[in-house]
Amino acid sequence: MNPSATLNFPAILAFSVHEMKNSLSIINEMIQQFTKNNTTNDNKELKQLEFEANRMNNNLMQLLILYKIDEAQFSPSVDEYLAIDILNEVVAQQASLFAINGLTLTLACPDDLLCYCDSSLISNAICTVVNNSQHYARTQVLLSASVTDDGYVNFSVEDDGAGYPKHFLHADAVDNTSINLNTGSTGLGLFFVATIAKMHINGGKKGFIKLSNQCPLGGAKFSLFLP
């Protein structure tokens, strides 16, 4: 390599992320095969391993998408979907870990509620929030979707934990200057979700997120609003 050449570190990082995603896909396939062949126990360890591999894959996908957004190489693929189908996909990905941890994941959504979105992005975003909620919930998490009076589709994740810390409630979740890599919680997941929400535009309205501790379950409430 020419020592005078300028390294394009973001591009190298994006390529590395892509390669790691490929490796994780292979690992996931192996885990699934081990789970299928292992009939001697309840496979708790393998289920946990599969979940963590999926979570890593989702995190890498988020990094790759954020890179493409920054490079103006990405836009959502918006179409009409049933909200219940998006939430059922989230439940399918999260249910095994909730069962392992003895938590209840409840779904509340009308069967005919339609929304215009990039379903894979929104599913990934909600999974990120649900995964975070199960770390802090005491016994249960409620996943719901409804229509607001001003026409937004509202996806909500509520839990019965201790609620969001105050700095989360007062900080701008889309301001990446608030990301602190020295803490255990970087806020990167919320930054991704907020970024994806803002990319959903319809009739002059943009998507957005809202965090609060005004939750009937007594803990944190995350809301994603799509126009």
Image: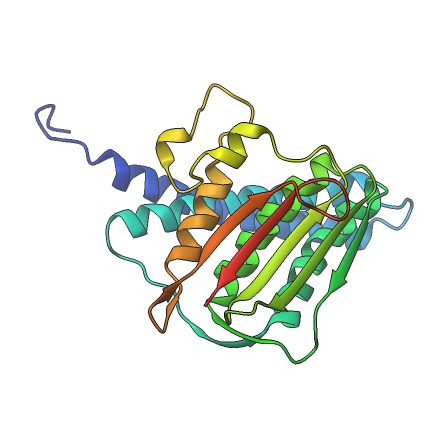
Q: Which quadrant is home to the N terminus?
A: top left
Residue 36: percent from left, percent from top? 79, 55
Q: Nearer the viewer, residue 50 or 126?
A: 126
Q: Residue at position x 51%, y 63% from top?
A: 120
The mark tally for this picture is 0
Q: Nearer the viewer, residue 18 or 145?
A: 145
Residue 227: percent from left, percent from top? 45, 68
Residue furthest toward the bottom?
Answer: 112
Vertical comparison of 84 with 41: above or below:
below
Q: Residue at position x 33%, y 44% from top?
A: 15
Determine the image quadrant of residue 145. Answer: bottom right
Q: Is residue 78 left or right of residue 133?
A: left
The answer to whether residue 217 is seen in the rendering is yes
Residue 195: percent from left, percent from top? 40, 50
Residue 155: percent from left, percent from top? 60, 60
Color encoding of the figure: rainbow
Q: Is residue 15 left or right of residue 220?
A: left
Q: Nearer the viewer, residue 197 or 225?
A: 225
Q: Residue at position x 70%, y 74% from top?
A: 110
The answer to whether residue 54 is seen in the rendering is no
Vertical comparison of 72 with 221: above or below:
below
Vertical comparison of 79 with 31: above or below:
below
Q: Residue at position x 36%, y 47% from top?
A: 66
Residue furthest toward the left?
Answer: 4
Q: Nearer the viewer, residue 187 or 15?
A: 187
Determine the image quadrant of residue 144. Answer: bottom right
